[in-house]
């Protein structure tokens, strides 16, 4: 390729000679090229739709100059005749070239390609042009797609780093403007400075892809140990070069020893690579609260990014289907590295040294245990996905975090079970094989099974190919003088090996792996000095529930001690946790309410939740508050996603001298498509509302002091960043009335960031024996006789507290007459954005032009123009 970059126009001109060798067993009449740059051209591309699914707004509202596309494409054969080509239907980033003559196996054809690349803004994916005219280009050029199983792989760009390029040899001549520098993982054969441009001659053998990083001044640190050169600009918090070299040398040596030698001479490890996939947890903390040293932060960032780039550049896998192998190796190696070099590290770093925080499991958690918790975040929400799911079918958190961690935890689990160093040696053997040819899951499976004397079919059938949960617990226990006999129950359908430990004072006195526990199974172990037996004590098995894994052999005492924890904490399987936190609420009649809330809600979801919140009201000088408890049941198969059985109650003042007590037993069902990327949900709920009200001297009393209402609701919605469509119905029945209502809502986001919202509401009484408007439809705010809205002054008819607006019923924002409808009501609401964001930017810029962020900004109040071509605001 001959490549020339126009920095100002963000344009790359390419002349390309492509020699395609047919190394398949098939005769080809067409060749497929990946053109991933063109995915940035259309919001309806696979990339654009994925952004919409994930509620990423910036690409959908981007200006044309920020988008990317491939243009002026001319493709010639070796006789310089023009060839027909087209983009595949619904895949704007895949090009199909029809050959003039069929290409037999072991034959080659030479093509000539001329095209221009308009580079996108890097704010979308991290690839493209960024601030100060820096560029990061990867998978931007037209490259032959990989050929597998009798066909070309036609994976569109979904921003998940799984390009299916065929292995190629590259020779490039690259021209960039004077004053810019090029950093790349290709070999630099020559460099020539010209008056206007700088020219590089580059090459690479057997490459899937390569990286171009351009800037006015290179900030890359170079490290070389004689076999590999590492170029990195990972943020180093001003570490000196010696400390960086020590860290890089340790990581490079560790990876070489535990995975294998890198097949290329150079590798880039950029901050942009890290920002695309940061270390989850570290990126959630503000810099001034960082509990880790600068050296440790740099080491973690470099470790994660280096292993990722190392594997992506050298392992020849189908990264859309078999991504879990490279992800598993990455996380497993990160865990091994921490065990070897930082065995005492905690998840929250130096914060663990503060005695006042010692009671928090979040603070005391070992560093490597966080992988299990982040994976369980999705499991407990019923949003985890099987590792054999194609990568483009994973929801964002799973693709970036949870599925990666599950893969690494699964490798660690198998390593603990097999022992004898089988996993480490298998990884090295697989890596060597995969760095020399295209490999698949079956190659990895064959290597593992060849080294193990144990049957590990369960690992692939259950851990990899299903989302079946693992949960074992103890049944009956019989203690003898010299033995302990216990029953283990399998709470799920999953049958996998599980370890049982004998524990005393947190010391392991014995460990035994148990297998084939399909139903209740009984085991006998010798009795020594241990006083507890624990299933999966070290959390080696990715189990759904660790809270039922303990049995005390003492005559008295809980299996797990009771522990009170302040605020919110991670779930601690070693204790029965009760969390407490100060609470504050306010309404006009109770005034400020102060209390202490007790609950069992940890960061991970639980099947049973208790929440009690007693509060003292200062104005009314009485006890108020609320309580709730519920059972949450997830369904792993089919469209029924979740069921909740709930009981809640509350007591507050609804008038200066009167309280209400509400009791709500309820049941709800949620439905969603098994494809979790489908943002469509529906559900139904049934509640029985029991309301008891004290009489008030300030309000006109009707017959609505004590009443019960049965309420049945249905909802259905599909939500994307560009549009939302929802509808629902509501049926209510009591002794005095019955009524039904329904609403439809539609929201559309346009390309200019303006938004249209439409709502239609209709309701009618089926029967109505009441003599007041207490249960009537509200023209503006609804009559909150179910006490489900958080109204600050619910009985006020004038003044500020009567103006609180709640969307419901008629939905009018102005109070009009009549205020209620006691037979039927039909209402529509519409809104459209007329406020200009550009005007806000101008005024914001005008106010803050002196700050360093806006320094040099040009603003003309009369013309309301922002910025200039040299230094835009």
Image (cartoon, grey):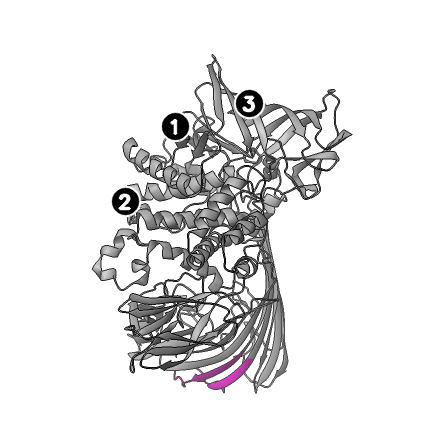
- The spot of residue 74 in percent (x, y) is 69, 26
What residue did someone put label 1 on? 226
Q: Are marks 3 and 1 in contact (CB under 8 Å)?
A: no
Q: Are there few (<14), some (14-19), or many (20+) residues within 10 Å of tag 2?
A: few
What residue did someone put label 3 on? 172
Quadrant that contains the N terminus? top right
Q: Nearer the viewer, residue 575 or 717?
A: 575
Mark 3 → mark 1, Cα distance in angstroms: 25 Å
Where 454 falls versus 257 (above or below)? below
Q: Are there few (<14), some (14-19), or many (20+) residues within 10 Å of tag 3?
A: some
Q: Earlier in the sequence, mark 3 or mark 2?
A: 3
Part of the protein shown in magenta = 687-710
Could you tell me how many numbered marks the image carries? Answer: 3
Is residue 804 in view from this perspective? no
Discs 3/2, front? 3
What residue did someone put label 2 on? 293
496 left or right of 74 in image? left
Q: Are marks 2 and 1 in contact (CB under 8 Å)?
A: no
Most extreme residue toward the left is: 355
């Amino acid at each position: 390729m001959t490549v020339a970059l126009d920095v100002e126009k963000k344009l790359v001109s390419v002349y390309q000679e492509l020699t395609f060798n047919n190394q398949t067993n098939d005769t080809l009449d067409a060749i497929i090229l990946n053109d991933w740059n063109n995915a940035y051209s259309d919001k309806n591309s696979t990339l654009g739709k994925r952004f919409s699914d994930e509620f990423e707004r910036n690409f959908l509202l981007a200006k044309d100059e920020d988008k990317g596309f491939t243009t002026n494409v001319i493709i010639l054969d070796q006789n310089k005749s023009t060839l027909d080509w087209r983009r595949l239907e619904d895949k704007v980033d895949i090009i199909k070239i029809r050959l003039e003559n069929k290409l037999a196996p072991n034959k080659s054809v030479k093509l000539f390609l001329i095209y221009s690349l308009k580079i996108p803004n890097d704010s979308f994916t991290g690839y493209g042009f960024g601030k100060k005219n820096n560029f990061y280009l990867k998978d931007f050029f037209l490259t032959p797609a990989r050929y597998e199983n009798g066909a070309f792989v036609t994976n569109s760009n979904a921003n998940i780093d799984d390009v299916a390029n065929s292995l190629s040899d590259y020779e490039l001549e690259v021209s960039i403007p004077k004053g810019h520098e090029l950093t790349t993982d290709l070999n630099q054969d020559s460099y020539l400075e010209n008056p206007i441009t700088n020219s590089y001659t580059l090459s690479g053998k057997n490459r899937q892809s390569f990286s171009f990083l351009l800037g006015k001044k290179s900030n890359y640190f170079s490290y070389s140990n004689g076999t590999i050169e590492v170029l990195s600009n990972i943020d180093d918090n001003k570490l000196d070069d010696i400390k960086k070299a020590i860290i890089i040398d340790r990581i490079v040596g560790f990876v070489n020893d535990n995975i294998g030698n890198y097949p290329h001479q150079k590798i880039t490890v950029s901050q942009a690579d890290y920002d695309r996939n940061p270390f989850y947890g570290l990126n959630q903390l503000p810099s001034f609260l960082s509990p880790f040293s600068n050296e440790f932060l740099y080491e973690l960032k470099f470790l994660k990014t280096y292993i990722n780039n190392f594997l992506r550049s050298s392992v020849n896998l189908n990264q859309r289907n078999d991504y879990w192998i490279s992800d598993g190796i990455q996380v497993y190696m990160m865990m091994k590295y921490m065990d070897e070099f930082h065995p005492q590290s905690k998840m929250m770093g130096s914060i663990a040294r503060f005695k006042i925080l010692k009671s928090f499991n979040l603070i005391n958690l070992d560093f490597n245990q966080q992988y299990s918790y982040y994976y369980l975040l999705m499991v407990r929400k019923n949003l985890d996905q099987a590792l054999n799911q194609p990568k483009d079918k994973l929801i964002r958190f799973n693709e970036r975090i949870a599925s990666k961690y599950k893969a690494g935890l699964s490798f660690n689990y198998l390593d603990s079970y097999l022992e004898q160093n089988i996993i480490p040696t298998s990884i090295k053997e697989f890596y060597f094989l995969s760095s020399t040819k295209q490999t698949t899951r079956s190659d990895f499976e064959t290597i593992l099974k060849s080294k193990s004397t144990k049957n590990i079919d369960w690992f692939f059938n259950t851990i990899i190919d299903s989302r079946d949960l693992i949960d074992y617990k103890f049944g009956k226990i019989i203690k003898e003088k010299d033995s302990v006999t216990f029953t283990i129950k399998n709470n799920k359908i999953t049958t996998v090996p599980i370890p049982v430990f004998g524990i005393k004072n947190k010391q392991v006195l014995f460990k035994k792996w148990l297998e084939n526990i399909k139903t209740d199974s009984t085991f006998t172990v010798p009795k020594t000095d241990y006083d507890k037996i624990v299933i999966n004590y070290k959390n080696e098995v990715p189990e759904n529930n660790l809270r039922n894994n303990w049995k005390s052999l003492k005559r008295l005492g809980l299996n797990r001690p009771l522990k009170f924890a302040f605020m919110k904490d991670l779930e601690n399987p070693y204790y029965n946790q009760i969390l407490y936190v100060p609470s504050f609420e306010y309404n006009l009649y109770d005034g400020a309410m102060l209390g202490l809330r007790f609950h069992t809600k940890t960061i991970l979801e639980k099947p049973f939740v208790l929440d009690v919140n007693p509060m003292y009201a200062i104005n009314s000088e009485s006890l108020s508050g609320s309580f709730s408890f519920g059972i949450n049941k997830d369904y792993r198969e089919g469209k029924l996603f979740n069921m909740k059985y709930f009981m809640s109650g509350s007591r507050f003042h609804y008038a200066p001298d009167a309280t209400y007590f509400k009791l709500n037993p309820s049941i709800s069902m949620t439905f969603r498509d098994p494809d979790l990327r489908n943002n469509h949900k529906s559900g139904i709920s049934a509640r029985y509302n029991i309301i008891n009200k004290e009489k008030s001297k300030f309000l006109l009393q009707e017959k609505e002091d004590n009443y019960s209402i049965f309420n049945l609701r249905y909802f259905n919605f599909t939500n994307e960043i560009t549009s939302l469509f929802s509808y629902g119905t509501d049926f209510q029945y009591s002794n005095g009335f019955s009524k039904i209502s329904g609403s439809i809502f539609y929201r559309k986001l346009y390309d200019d960031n303006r938004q249209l919202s439409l709502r239609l509401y209709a309701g009618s009484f089926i029967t109505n024996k009441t003599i007041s408007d207490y249960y009537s439809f509200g023209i503006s705010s609804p009559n909150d006789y179910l006490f489900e809205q958080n109204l600050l002054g619910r009985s006020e008819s004038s003044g500020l507290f009567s103006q609180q607006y709640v969307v419901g019923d008629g939905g009018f924002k102005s109070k009009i007459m009549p205020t209620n409808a006691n037979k039927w009501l039909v209402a529509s609401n519409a809104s459209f954005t007329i406020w200009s964001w550009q005007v806000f930017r101008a005024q914001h810029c005008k106010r803050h032009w002196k700050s360093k962020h806006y320094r040099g900004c040009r603003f003309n109040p009369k013309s309301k123009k922002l910025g200039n071509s040299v230094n835009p605001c």
